[in-house]
Image: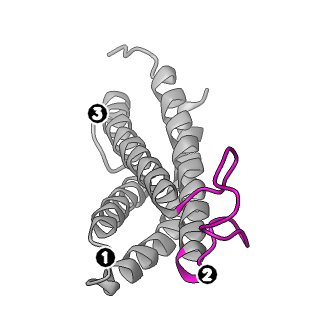
């Protein structure tokens, strides 16, 4: 059977993966930023949260950084779910079945970790200090997952390129 080229799908996957990794990096930066703001009482690395320059160019406050962090997180969840859909459609369309490499397992683990991270983020509060630790721990493990899925993905891409 002659199937259409799936190169457009793989390009979409490559962009989605790149943007997912960028989102992960930005989440790490904003997460550290929020941690520093919460523990040191400063909005920028060293600038006080209140007083002084409240006009134009004043430092960002914790709610704005938290909102940015949530927005980037929602974007990353969306991108990872898009990657899951692309992977399933592309693999079924090209091979007719799933499970041709460890990339499927790596991808599913990353999807689960991203979803667990998102759910744990919604549980963070002063009454649930364990939720912050869980969220950070999952994201550290997610680094390993992203590394694994990137390496196995590169191997898979080599199968599709002429």
Residue appearing at x 27%, y 64% in the figure? 119
User: Of 58 and 137, which appears nearest the observer?
Assistant: 58
Query: Is residue 36 positioned above or below 107 on the image?
Result: below
The residue wearing badge 2 is: 40
**Residue range corresponding to the magenta coloring:** 38-61
Residue at 45 percent across and 76 percent down: it is 136
Report helix, strand or loop for mark 1.
Answer: loop
Residue wearing tag 1: 125
Q: Are marks 3 and 2 in contact (CB under 8 Å)?
A: no
Q: Which residue matches tag 3?
A: 96
Image quadrant for the N terminus?
top left
Question: Residue 110 falls in which quadrant of the image?
Answer: bottom left
| Residue 144 in picture, x, y percent from top left | 53, 69
Instruction: Report helix, strand or loop for mark 2.
Output: helix
Residue 57 to residue 35: above or below: above
Give the Cα separation between the discs numbered 2 and 1: 18 Å
Image height check: is 10 above or below 70? above
């Amino acid at each position: 059977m002659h199937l259409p080229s799936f190169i457009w799908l793989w390009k979409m996957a490559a962009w989605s993966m790149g943007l997912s990794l960028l989102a992960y990096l930005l989440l790490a930066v904003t997460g550290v930023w929020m941690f520093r703001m919460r523990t040191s009482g400063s909005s920028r690395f060293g600038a006080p949260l209140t007083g002084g320059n409240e006009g134009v160019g004043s430092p960002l406050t914790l709610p704005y950084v938290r909102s940015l962090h949530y927005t980037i997180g929602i974007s990353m969840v969306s991108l990872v779910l898009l990657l899951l859909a692309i992977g399933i459609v592309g693999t079924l369309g090209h091979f007719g079945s799933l499970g041709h490499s460890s990339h499927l397992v790596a991808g599913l683990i990353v999807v689960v970790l991203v979803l667990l991270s998102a759910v744990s983020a919604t549980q963070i509060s002063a009454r649930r200090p364990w939720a912050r630790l869980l969220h950070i721990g999952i994201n550290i493990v997610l680094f390993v997952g992203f590394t694994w899925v990137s390496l196995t993905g590169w191997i898979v891409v080599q199968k599709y390129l002429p």
